[in-house]
């Protein structure tokens, strides 16, 4: 299984600011995904991070709010822009897919917006 | 698109008893069904998965069954222990396209000593 490291693990952010979350994987992976988990809720896919091209966003998520970078096959960043209290969530990086399908998650970045 | 329904939302069982969590999916093309366990303050951990060419899979105290005709799959935990207390999520995916997981709503399992 892949080892996925996320930074920061936890942060308290001021309303109106932006925060970038980093995801580092210990091996090259084709597919990287970013999920959001609001308090007490299930996981919702934000976007698929594509290496060498723009991310593919799901309905309800836009690039201006959640810009994503994927400079290589082991690293991705997600920025949460112009944060409001509604953005208080766990943001999770995941990797996997392909013919094997197995998808693994990082420990998440717990953001609280005040 | 795919829709996954999970029941119950909360489940409380006595230590040593069995726990069963059920999920249904809508897209008959889905062919991979993982289960994740999420403990407080941690990310989801894959505990077992099943592919559509298999009806049942077991790993020690954990088993998953799949009924493709009825489009439902279930997680079975036997001889439950306090450390089994967590939130469990089922998910479904198609082995095509962007391969995006669709999650159920989650089940909060509490094991009472």
Image (cartoon, coloured by chain):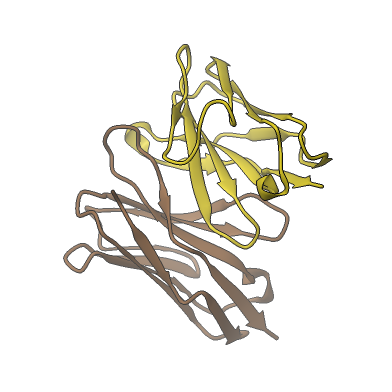
Chain colours: A yellow, B brown
Q: Is residue B24 left or right of residue B45?
A: left
Residue A102 figure quarter? top left
In the shown orientation, is residue A103 left or right of residue B32?
A: right
How many numbered tags mark residues here? Answer: 0
**Residue A101 drawn above or below residue B51:** above
- The foreground one among A88 and A9 is A88
Q: In the figure, residue B87 lies in which quadrant?
A: bottom right
Q: Position of residue A40 (x, y in %)?
A: 62, 63
Query: Residue sitting at 54 percent across and 86 percent down?
Result: B17
Q: Position of residue A67 (x, y in %)?
A: 58, 25
Q: Is residue B36 above or below residue B61?
A: above
Residue A38 is drawn in which quadrant? bottom right
Give percent across and percent down for residue B12. 59, 83
Q: Is residue A44 above or below residue B75?
A: above
Near-viewer residue (B5 or B12): B5
Task: Please tell me which residue is depicted at 70% across the width and 32% down the height of the picture.
Answer: A82
Q: Position of residue A19 (x, y in %)?
A: 74, 30
Which quarter of the rendered picture does the C terminus of chain B lie within? bottom right
The residue depicted at 55 percent of the width and 80 percent of the height is: B11
């Amino acid at each position: 299984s892949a080892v996925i490291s996320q930074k920061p693990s936890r942060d308290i952010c001021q309303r109106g600011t932006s925060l970038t979350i980093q995801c580092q994987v210990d091996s090259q992976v084709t597919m990287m995904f970013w999920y959001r988990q609001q308090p007490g809720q299930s996981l919702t896919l934000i976007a698929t991070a594509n290496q060498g091209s723009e991310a593919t966003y799901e309905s309800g998520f836009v690039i201006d709010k959640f810009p994503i970078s994927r400079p290589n096959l082991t690293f991705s960043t997600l920025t949460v822009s112009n944060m409001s209290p509604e953005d208080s969530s766990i943001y999770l990086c995941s990797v996997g897919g392909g013919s094997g399908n197995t998808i693994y998650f990082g420990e998440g970045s717990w953001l609280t917006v005040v | 698109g795919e829709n996954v329904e999970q029941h119950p939302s909360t489940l409380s069982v006595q230590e040593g008893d069995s726990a069963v969590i059920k999920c249904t999916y809508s897209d008959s093309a889905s062919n991979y069904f993982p289960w994740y366990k999420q403990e407080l303050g941690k990310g989801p951990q894959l505990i077992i998965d099943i592919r559509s060419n298999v009806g049942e899979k077991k790993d020690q105290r954990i088993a998953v069954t799949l009924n493709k005709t009825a489009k439902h799959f279930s997680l079975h935990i036997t001889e439950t222990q306090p450390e089994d207390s967590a939130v469990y999520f089922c998910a479904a995916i198609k082995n095509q396209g962007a391969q995006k997981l669709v999650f159920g709503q989650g089940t909060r399992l509490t094991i009472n000593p």
